[in-house]
Image (tube, grey):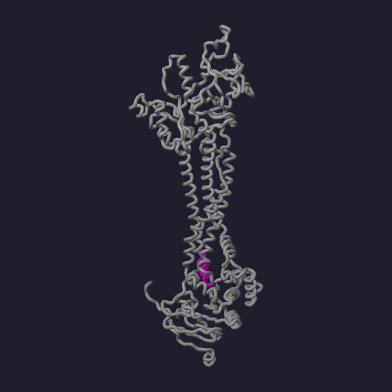
Amino acid sequence: MGSEKIIALNNINLNFDKNKIYCIIGTSGSGKSTLLNMIAGLEKPSKGQILFNNMHLEKFNEEQLAEFRKKYVGFVFQSYNLFPTLTALENVCMPLIFSRVPKKIRIEKAKEMLKNVGLENRINHKPSQMSGGQQQRVSIARAFVNNPSVIFADEPTGNLDTKTTFEMMDLITNIARKNNQTLIIVTHDLEISCYADMIIHIRDGIIDEIKNQKEIKNEK
Amino acid sequence: MNNIDLIAMALKNLFKRKLRTFLTILGVSIGTASIIVMISLGLAINKNFESQLLQLSDITLIHVVGVDETSPQYQTKKNKIKLDNTAVYNFKQIKNVEAVSPIINLSYSIKALCGKYCATLNVVGIEAPFLKILGYELESGRFLNEDDKLNIVCGGKVPYSFRKKNSRSYVYYDSPQVNLMKDRVTISTDMNYGEVDTTDGNSSSSNIKSHAVKFVGILKSDESGWSESDYNCYMTIEQTKKLKAEMRKKNSGENNSDEYNQIYVKCKNINSVKDIAEKVKELGYNAYYEGEYLENMRATSANMQALLGAIGAVSLFVAAIGIANTMIMSVYERTREIGIMKVIGASIRDIKKLFLLESSIIGFFGGIIGALISLLVSHILNTTNISFFNTDVYMYSEKSVVSLIPIWLCAVAIIFSGLIGLFSGYFPARRATKLSALVAIKAE
């Protein structure tokens, strides 16, 4: 079983432009998360190339990938992935600590970011003292605080109710557009896709179809 | 990640798991404390040993006192082995021997006269340069020269031993009644010399042979205590031989011999004393040196120290395993956290540093607490004065300590336990860095 070859992705050829919002849609097991992990430099492809600003991510070693993630990438996860023992403020400060931002500046930045996501009253609360939506807001603040050029969101609304889902999507797309950032969202929720400029459907590791917003609207 | 943030984060992480951190630190501190205490016992033993050595008169001097009749050398050569000039020559050939001198001791059989005062002198014959070699210092005058005849260099207490003629009681004077360096002094081998023989009321000096002597030097006497030289009157070997011959003529019973009472062998340094003494014994003589039994004692205590050191080392080793264990547990527990850190931009070096720092902090604090514990234990040992090893040779040995902890020992121990922390953190740190960010995040 262990040695059986599983092809998660095959013959994928995609271009992501700057300042656009992409949505990768597919059923579970379609390979959409694998695709995201590869673009984000978390996983390496067994074949092929991943280019980011003409940098070959597939050739990077661990240290270079860490550097790449620190400089260019922000993450939002389905399960928030906050540090449970740290307060909201400390959680948002984390990426700045790794980027060697001085303490004064990083606290300022983190506070501003938390204000942007509407949590200015909760900066000293720990994740366990917050609702799922609030936790996700913290994690969004954390993803954006370093002003990355790309934000990856892996099922960002998977654990949230419908109302919160839309709040969260509004928040995340607004910030991305305001800061001219590329946002790549992976989801199986079709409703989310209306926030995207481009929608990429994946099925069994193969790109099924790519639609832009016009085509989506026309369909409707 | 800058260093201050790194330290802050490491401390925070350790503080999060208070009990575990505390227990690990406790383990390290006990290990460190036990090693420090064990070493301190050894240091104290060595220090006592050294101060006892200093109390001895001369530790590089071997006294050859006679012939070992049980030695194979003596059995084969029979009577050929004696304390004579051949022996002196043989000893001079041994490696690392600085000088050899025969000693003739006329053991208080010389009477000296100085004006109204007289004294019984302990005349010792010695090679002229040897007084200097033995490390004696002069109070006044000079040492002996090779060509000195009836010249005497005496110990610092000799002037005090002159008492009024014919007085039966030995009074100890606060200041000497004679000035030996200036006054005229005569000596004789006759013990009645200079004193009135109460039986015939006349001085019997007419038929007693006497010699005029000159005191050319007085040695400094050791203020701190008793010194071998204090009551001796040193003359050259040749002159002492003559006096001895004169004595022998008088009590003709003694057979004439060219044997010496003792032979002094002065060694070049402390380390060679033992070997030289062995060689002298191999030649068939009885020899001893002052440090001999102290050395045996040190050998025994060195074994003891090694054993104690080993016990300390074992406990520190166990503590090191404890640190490694704590850190590995920590890696398992924080798998997810490490993954998140990686995803949000922590470099491998940051994570490695964090883990190594955490484990060194455990080691370092363990070291500090251990040092404090050991200082306390040492204090208790010294005040209650429990003695583990009875190394005191002299009952009056003043400042014998049970445990001795110098600052450097504390410093070394703290640094050492910090390093142990660092090393035991290495494997867990490597493990943490090797975690795939993706797998780590998914772990729940």
Location of residue A210 with respect to B64 vertically, above or below? below
Location of residue B16 with respect to B57 vertically, above or below? below
Q: Position of residue A206 (x, y in %)?
A: 43, 83
Location of residue B383 with respect to B78 vertically, above or below? below
- Determine if residue A86 is in view: yes
Give the magenta part as a residue range. B333-344
Asked whether B221 or B373 is in front, the reply is: B221
Q: Position of residue B101 (x, y in %)?
A: 46, 29
- Determine if residue B221 is in view: no
Residue B345: quadrant of the picture: bottom right
Task: Name the residue at 41% across, 35% down.
Answer: B94
Instruction: Give the tally of numbered discs.
Output: 0
Whether residue B341 is in magenta: the answer is yes
Image check: A150 left or right of A9?
A: right
Residue most extreme to the left = B76
Whether residue A68 is in magenta: the answer is no
The quarter of the picture where the N terminus of chain B appears is bottom right
Residue most extreme to the top = B200
Q: Main secondary structure of the magenta part?
A: helix
Task: Name the residue at 65% across, 72% down.
Answer: A108
Asked whether A76 or B428 is in front, the reply is: B428
Residue most extreme to the bottom = A218
Residue most extreme to the front = B147
Q: Position of residue B107 (x, y in %)?
A: 50, 21
Q: Position of residue B135 (x, y in %)?
A: 53, 33
Location of residue A95 with respect to B128 vertically, above or below? below
